[in-house]
Image: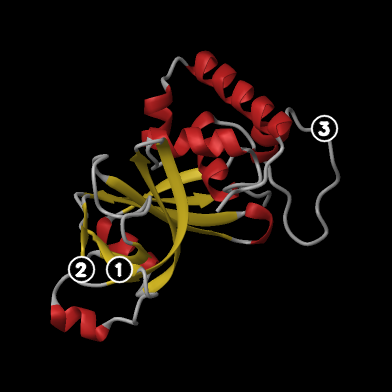
Amino acid sequence: MTTEHDPAPAAALARRFADRLADLGITEAQAAARAGMSTVYLRRVLELGPGFDPPALLRLSAVLGLEYEELVAGRPVERAARADGPALVGPPVLGELDVAECWRRLGSNGLGRIARTGPDGPVVRPVGYLVHGRAVLYRTTEGGALAPGPGGDAAFEADRADRGLREGWSVLVTGPLEYVTEPALLAELPEPPADGRWVRLTPTTVTGRSIRAPRKG
């Protein structure tokens, strides 16, 4: 799957991000960790630009102490308060979710993303997931980019953001991948496509962030 993006906004976004890192005296790796994402995923977000993953950019704007619009589109001009909600009065506020809350937010299933390093470089793909026994399960093509194999641990991210990016959350799970082989478990799972297999990500780390934009009053 390819993601359409305009390189001009992406390049400007990456430049603003780098400039802000220099102003704050922090590294790319530190910014990624504080935003609850891997450096591989952060670079993918910057490469694909503002339309790829707005919740991830919302977390980054909080880490950088910027308003969301300032990060993605440059310094904002004065604008009237929105008619559909309270006006934003500063950069989003980032909080931490404990492990139990992370699993609660993930629920039993949903949509997320898998990020890993493959033979041709970083790969980020959307997946439908299930949670089973504190592990994340998803289906993929055997031997494909998201299949178990060389490349180290994978990262799984799921997030939600409300209309207007006023609040949301993000959960990041990292760990090794393996094919699901237990007959009893496979019997419980939906049948994958003819050339597909179920894959399990067993967590070594589970972290989460809440995002809340401050309001007047």
Label 3 sits on what residue type? Val
Q: Relative to 199, does residue 203 appear above or below in the rendering?
A: above
Label 3 with label 1: CB-CB less than 8 Å: no
Label 2 with label 3: CB-CB less than 8 Å: no
- Side of 70 where 160 appears, left or right: left
Q: In front here: 11 or 121?
A: 121
Mark 2 and mark 3 lie on one chain; the one further toward the N terminus is 3
Q: Which residue is mark 3?
A: 77
- Side of 14 where 112 appears, left or right: left
Residue 96 in sight: yes
Label 1 with label 2: CB-CB less than 8 Å: yes
Label 2 sits on what residue type? Val
Label 1 sits on what residue type? Arg
Disc 3 to disc 1, C-alpha distance: 50 Å
Identify the coloring: secondary structure
Identified at 34% across, 81% down, the residue is 191
Q: Residues within 10 Å of mark 1 (few under 14, many from 20)?
A: many
Mark 3 and mark 1 lie on one chain; the one further toward the N terminus is 3
Q: Residues within 10 Å of mark 3 (few under 14, many from 20)?
A: few
In the rendered structure, find residue 180 and report the number of the disc placed on it: 2
Q: Which residue is mark 1?
A: 197
Identify the secondary structure beneath mark 1.
strand
Identify the secondary structure beneath mark 3.
loop
Identified at 35% across, 39% down, the residue is 117
